[in-house]
Image (cartoon, rainbow, N blue to C red):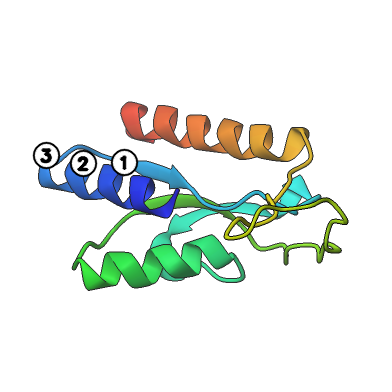
Amino acid sequence: MVSSKLLLIEQSKKANVAVISCMGAGNKLDATKFEVADISKTSVCPLAKIMRKELKNRKIENVKVVYSKEAAIKIQKSNENIPKGKHQIVGSVSFVPSVAGLLLAGEVIKDIAGV
């Protein structure tokens, strides 16, 4: 997922196309903790941390993101047999990603309207 987000942002910046990206929503329960900020101003979110580092390595700046300040809920290891080399999938509660998506859509509309 990180490589896809990075490629999309990188290509958008090269083409001078505005882009906004959503960071991690997995293992979150409090939808009120989502914020909109430049990637350089994010905190708490592990995905945003990785993206910050990779974008800095690529000398890409000024990327608007939706991210959560809520610490991810610790999950217990599953008793299911997870194939060797695979990881347990980070889950999300159904309403949390949709709230992040609505915030992202609202930012797009505000940017288009110049608000």
Real-space Cα distance between discs 1 and 2? Answer: 7 Å
Q: Which residue is mark 1?
A: 19
The three-letter amino acid code for the residue at tag 1 is Val
For mark 1, give the secondary structure: loop
- CB within 8 Å, label 2 to label 3: yes
The answer to whether marks 1 and 2 mark residues whose Cβ atoms lie closer than 8 Å is yes
Mark 1 crowd level (few <14, some 14–19, many ≥20, 10 Å Cα): some
At x 42% / y 45%, what residue is drawn? 21
Q: Residue at x 50, y 30 (%)?
A: 105
Give the amino acid type for the residue marked by disc 3 in the picture. Ala
Is 21 placed left or right of 25 in the picture? left
Residue 37, given in percent of the width and then of the height, sits at: 47, 57
Q: State the residue position of label 3.
A: 15
Residue 28 placement (x, y as % from top left): 75, 53
Q: Which mark is residue 12?
A: 2
N-terminal of the pair, mark 1 or mark 2, is: 2
Which amino acid lies under the numbered mark 2 shown in the image of this protein? Ser
Residue 21 is left or right of residue 89, and the answer is left
| Quadrant (top left, top right, bottom left, bottom right) of the C terminus | top left
Disc on res. 67: none
Residue at screen point 60% across, 55% down: 86
